[in-house]
Amino acid sequence: MEKFTEHHLKVQRTARYFTYGNLSENTEQVWFALHGYAMLAKQLIKRFHVLDPEKHFVVAPEGLSRFYWNGFNGKPVASWMTSEDRLNEIEDYIAYLDRLYAATLEKISKKKVVINALGFSQGTATSARWLAAQNSSVDNMIFWAGPLPNDVDWDKALPIFNQSNVIFVLGDQDQFITKKHQLDHQEKLDKLGLQYTNLDFKGKHEVDESLLSQIAENISKQ
């Protein structure tokens, strides 16, 4: 009888990311923008064109797994993880994001800038797991059109999250998140003891540029 055994091997690979703006002594805010499922980083970062590139520097990493959407003739898209070998995929993208964070901020004084993490859709759970690992810290956590994951040790992560300004954003016509989903998620957050703000806009499962501009402006005034 044949015996099959699963193994894992650490390898080096090349990760792609996009940036917007000019990182300099004039930079006021640094953003880490994590895209959603079946997107590419360049799709999400285009939404940030409404921000002043001299005051805002945006880093948009791309998920390490790519595939063709709607079959082999479809467009290439990316994902942060799937259910297959998920723990190793999570460990890999946390290490990737930590390295990108360190490489970006070594070029500028963290004390002089506001650091933001914005996760959209699948990027919400991704950014939450990344920040819960506590290797990288941000001033503002913006979770856009996605819930927090259940597989985080919230007893350890909650104090870190409550030290940041946590914002949840949702479109009133989001085709993936029902009102029941939203209410259930708010109940979960309240039970956790998370301090957060809810914002909404008229729109679907997307990053609304007008609201993004408002959030950036309000953050800069704090």
Image: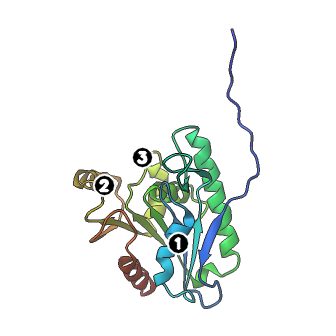
Label 2 sits on residue = 177
The x, y position of residue 137, in whole percent, is 56, 67
Q: Residues within 10 Å of mark 2 (few under 14, many from 20)?
A: some
Residue beneath the point at 48% across and 55% down: 157
Is residue 198 positioned above or below 84 on the image?
below
Could you tell me how far apart the alpha carbons at marks 3 and 1 are, in whole angstroms?
27 Å
| Helix, strand or loop at mark 2 | loop
Q: Position of residue 222 (x, y in %)?
A: 42, 84
Q: How many marks?
A: 3
Mark 3 element type = loop
Whether tag 3 and tag 1 are in contact, CB under 8 A, the answer is no
Front position among marks 3 and 1: 1
- Which labelled disc corresponds to residue 45? 1
Q: Are marks 2 and 3 in contact (CB under 8 Å)?
A: no
Binning the other alpha carbons within 10 Å of mark 3 as few (below 14), some (14 to 19) or many (20 upward) gives few
Mark 3 or mark 1: name the one nearer the start of the chain: 1
Which residue is located at x 61 percent, y 78 percent?
Answer: 110
**Residue 211 x/y as whole percent:** 36, 77
**Mark 2 or 3, nearer chain start:** 3
- Residue 57 image position (x, y, % from top left): 58, 80
Q: Amino acid at mark 2?
A: Ile
Q: Give the class, few, some or many, for how many residues have Cα within 10 Å of label 1's Cα (few <14, many ≥20).
A: many
Q: In the image, what residue type sits under mark 3?
A: Asn
> Which amino acid does the dot numbered 1 rest on?
Ile
Residue in the picture at 67% in, 68% down: 102
Q: Disc 2, disc 1: CB below 8 Å?
A: no
- 169 or 74, nearer to the observer: 74
Residue displayed at 55% across by 52% down? 80
Which residue corresponds to mark 3? Answer: 150
Q: Is residue 115 above or below residue 196?
A: below
Q: Which mark is residue 107?
A: none
